[in-house]
Amino acid sequence: QKEVEQNSGPLSVPEGAIASLNCTYSDRGSQSFFWYRQYSGKSPELIMFIYSNGDKEDGRFTAQLNKASQYVSLLIRDSQPSDSATYLCAVKSGGGADGLTFGKGTHLIIQP
Amino acid sequence: SAVISQKPSRDICQRGTSLTIQCQVDSQVTMMFWYRQQPGQSLTLIATANQGSEATYESGFVIDKFPISRPNLTFSTLTVSNMSPEDSSIYLCSVAGYEQYFGPGTRLTVT
């Protein structure tokens, strides 16, 4: 049984600070890792994906992957109130033919 | 990324009836996926739809309850059959290359 674990939160962060979101996964065969942002009543929006160990940066977002520890994280720098949302971690075992296994999501609140 | 549309965007249905949800993509894609998001929960994969073959269902989901069609490379349907209130969810289609993108979802309420 593939499992993806996230702290449900809420995680409250002051505006301008760094928000750190964490995710662990059980399937060592997982190949790719995704972070989605979901606003209430909306569908998930892809923020970042990462395949290799280490860091991947895109604007204010940095994804970090440690396959040995089965751990993936998302850092949001200079947090803005518009970043307040639920962040979903998802993993895929194989290539394009595989669907995603999602965590339950972390509710992030950026305090103005 | 592909542009994905779904119809209907929302519906309220009576128990025992069926609803067919349509998913249209603006480009040809090999793999399409259907997910369910129950109230307050995360997404759960229902099935994978590959054009020209039978859909592959995840554990806990069966074809009689969630029949899927995939007539071409830009379109798929998911039917929720013999609905009960427990089927009240958001149903999302998704397309995949290396990344997966989601349609806007269909919010279904069963009364």
Image: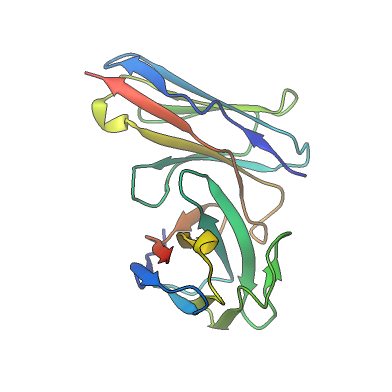
Residue closest to the eye, A41 or B32? A41
Please state the horizontal and vertical placement of residue A94, each as a whole percent of the image: 71, 51
The image quarter in which residue A52 lies: top right
The image quarter in which residue B63 lies: bottom right
Direction bottom: furthest residue: B71
- Does the image show residue B48? yes
User: Measuring 42% from the left and 24% from the top, which residue is drawn there?
Assistant: A10
- Does the image show residue A65? no
Q: Is residue B87 above or below residue A4?
A: below
Question: Which quarter shows the C terminus of chain A?
Answer: top left
Residue closest to the eye, B2 or A35? A35
User: Measuring 51% from the left and 78% from the top, which residue is drawn there?
Assistant: B77
The image quarter in which residue B10 lies: bottom left
Please state the horizontal and vertical placement of residue B29, each as a whole percent of the image: 53, 71
- Left or right: residue A26 compared with residue A9: right
Q: In this view, does A111 lie above or below B51?
A: above
Please state the horizontal and vertical placement of residue B20, each as a whole percent of the image: 47, 79
Q: In this view, does A101 lie above or below A84?
A: below
Q: Is residue A67 above or below residue B66?
A: above
Residue closest to the eye, B9 or A51? B9
- Left or right: residue A56 compared with residue B105: right
Direction left: furthest residue: A112
User: Measuring 35% from the left and 73% from the top, which residue is drawn there?
Assistant: B8
